[in-house]
Image: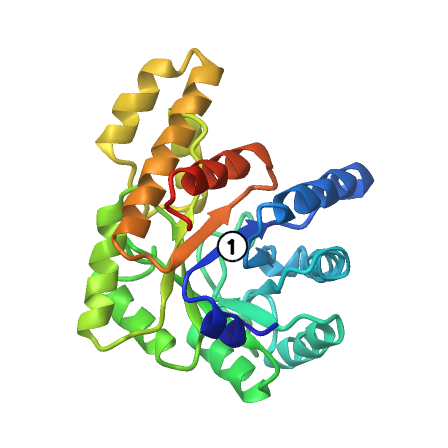
Amino acid sequence: MRLDELLAERPRTLSFEYFPPRGDRGTLLWQETVRQLADLGPDFVSVTYGAGGTTRDGTRDAIAFINEHTDLPSMAHLTCVGNSRQEIAELLDDYAAAGIDNLLALRGDPPKGVADWQPHPEGFTYASELLAAIHADGRFGTACAAFPEGHPDAPDRHQDWQNLATKLQSGVSLGITQAFFDADHYLAMVRHLREAGVTTPVVPGILPVRSWSWANQFVERFCPTTSLPETLRAELEPLEGNPIACRKAGVAFTIRLCQDLLAAGAPGLHIYTLNKVAPTAEVVTALRLLGSLD
């Protein structure tokens, strides 16, 4: 099912993100994770695409498994990194043949070991250009990325939100945010978009927290513009020597964040599972018991 059709039926969605497995054992574990989390009833799932296309085939094969073994709509990530326009066109054919109906179009991060973003000489420079090519193709529903605290390469967050507004008005069905830990940043971004006349839904991306040190390492590596609130440090840092207590407190923090976002009108949740069952299952189950996901 295409994303635009899905959202017409379900104004609030729950979705999960996976990254492609590696190796035979990793694949078996990943497949079991997908089966178990499918029982939670997400509205759709997405699969990431490695820098420089390092998991291109893995993304396609992972979604082929999801399509064959679950009833869940799926979405493949697609980036500009390392691909010419012709290669993107060929990849769209490849994805369509594999039964992929939806794409999350991203500029993408530089490959590992490369400091600065450099577009392919015959490729796209911006996600907006990639989106335009996908829309011209016409076979896919589309989503784009959003950054509540601004993209790392943007001069400031307001300029980045203006760029986001342009993408959201270009025909995409959904924005999905980078992980964040303070609802106020998301709500400020949404207010900015609504004041600009943008009505396309933007779903918050949720990363279940494991510990204070882990959160710092994750943000430093993957979300350099994302801040960690003092309340999170105060709750988790004193527990660093107790992994069980850290994990419990991190999940509790994540549940409260989700409650605040849904109560403020967020059109759903997109959970970054990191291919783990327990944290996602705990968050979703608690929110349902609390009535937040009814």
Q: Is residue 125 visible?
A: no
Which residue is labeled 1 in the image?
A: 15
* Quadrant of the image containing the N terminus: bottom right
Q: Is residue 160 left or right of residue 103?
A: left
Front residue of 1 and 158? 1
Tell me what residue is drawn at x 41 percent, y 41 percent. Answer: 287
Q: Position of residue 279 (x, y in %)?
A: 51, 34
Q: Is residue 80 left or right of residue 236?
A: right
Q: Is residue 21 left or right of residue 261?
A: right
Front residue of 260 and 156? 260
Tell me what residue is drawn at x 57 percent, y 32 percent. Answer: 278
Q: Position of residue 116 (x, y in %)?
A: 44, 57
Quadrant of residue 62 within the rendered picture: bottom right
Q: Position of residue 22 (x, y in %)?
A: 73, 44
Residue lying furthest left in this view?
A: 195
Q: Is residue 249 above or below residue 219?
A: above
Q: Is residue 185 visible?
A: yes
Tell me what residue is drawn at x 67 percent, y 55 percent. Answer: 55
Q: SS of the residue at dot 1?
A: strand
Amino acid marked by disc 1 = Ser
Q: Is residue 27 above or below residue 118?
A: above
Q: Is residue 119 above or below residue 286?
A: below
Tell me what residue is drawn at x 20 percent, y 66 percent. Answer: 192
